[in-house]
Image (cartoon, grey):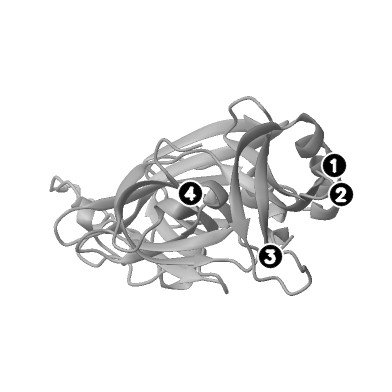
Amino acid sequence: MGHGDHWQAVEQDKDNFIDTMLPLICQEGRLVGENSFCHTLQEFDKKEGVVFGVQYPVIESPVSFLGLAVSDDRTGNRELWTAYPVCAEGPCTRLVVDEVKPWPNGIEGTVEAYMPEGDSICFFDPYFFLNKEKYQEWAELDIALSALAYIVEKVEPEEAETAENPPPGLHAEQVAGIAPAADSATVPSQPDPDDYPAQYFPRGENGDSADIEFIVEEAVPVACIGRLFWRMTGVIMRTDNALEMRIHVYASEQVLKGYVPQPGDDVLALAWVQGRLQGVA
């Protein structure tokens, strides 16, 4: 399926977890849409067809699971081609599409887009099978951004760093706190939000995974299929003209390893970045 690491971000024993979830998706999931597609996979003679998206659980959930099944026109049967976790909709950012990268199966893909006067971000749209026609080069679109964390680490402050010397990089050994130690004889000034860490570095073959660093603005515990996740919200990118890119990062208890996120924490995460058209699916 090509999403093993993504399943493992939810459950360490991914193989048994997938074996449990796939029947639930296929038998109890709800149809969220269908679309025509064509593919470039060599092992299939028929190069086009219809893809159906089936999502589980059927009720609104902060983390859900989407299966994509392809129909066989000759028999009417549907064959499950792929399935993966889906994060709930995140904060919306206005982005300009730079490049659309369909995967060979024709039903999945990533999109590279950028904030006006800002840097670009690459994301996987879980509903690419429905939205692919809407991603046109140079189109300005409202994209809701979220991410599923593989690794989360709190950055501990170091007394030697101050707000005038913000952290230079993403890695834990390079990162220091943003607040100076207060002098008892002075009143500390309010830190400039522009000094807060907001970092994004794409990773992985498809570019839709990333190292990100942000200050937790909000941390909310959420439940999905009997598992506890923490939803952390923060800014991962800023432009010179004060535009900000926010994201919801979902982390399972196994990923957090006992860490409980709190507002104000400086957090590093390796995460799978997802984006979806605002108001779609």
Is residue 181 left or right of 1 when viewed as pictured? left
**Residue 16, label in figure:** 2
Which amino acid does the dot numbered 2 rest on?
A: Asn
Residue type at mark 4: give it: Asn
Say which element carries label 1.
Answer: helix
How far across and how far down the image is residue 261, in percent? Answer: 50, 43
Asked if the residue at tag 1 contacts the one at tag 3, i.e. Cβ–Cβ closer than 8 Å, the answer is: no
Outermost residue toward the top in this view: 59
The answer to whether residue 41 is above or below residue 23 is below
Q: Which residue is mark 1?
A: 20
The residue under label 3 is which amino acid type? Lys
Say which residue appears at 64% left-offset and 38% top-offset.
64
Rendered position, 96 above or below 247: below
- For residue 45, which quarter of the picture? bottom right
Q: Residues within 10 Å of mark 3 (few under 14, many from 20)?
A: some
- CA gap, disc 4 to disc 2? 31 Å
Viewer-nearest residue: 138 or 75: 75
For the point 49% across and 33% down, the residue is 220
Tag 1 near tag 2, CB within 8 Å: yes
- Locate the N terminus and report the quarter of the image it occupies: bottom right
Camera-side mark, 4 or 1 = 4
Q: Give the spatial CA distance, label 1 vs label 2.
A: 6 Å
Query: At 73% from the left edge and 31% from the top edge, which residue is drawn?
Result: 226
Answer with mark 2 or mark 3, whichever residue precedes in sequence. Answer: 2
Mark 3, mark 1: which one is toward the viewer? 3
Please state the horizontal and vertical placement of residue 116, each as a whole percent of the image.
Answer: 22, 59
Return the mark for residue 47.
3
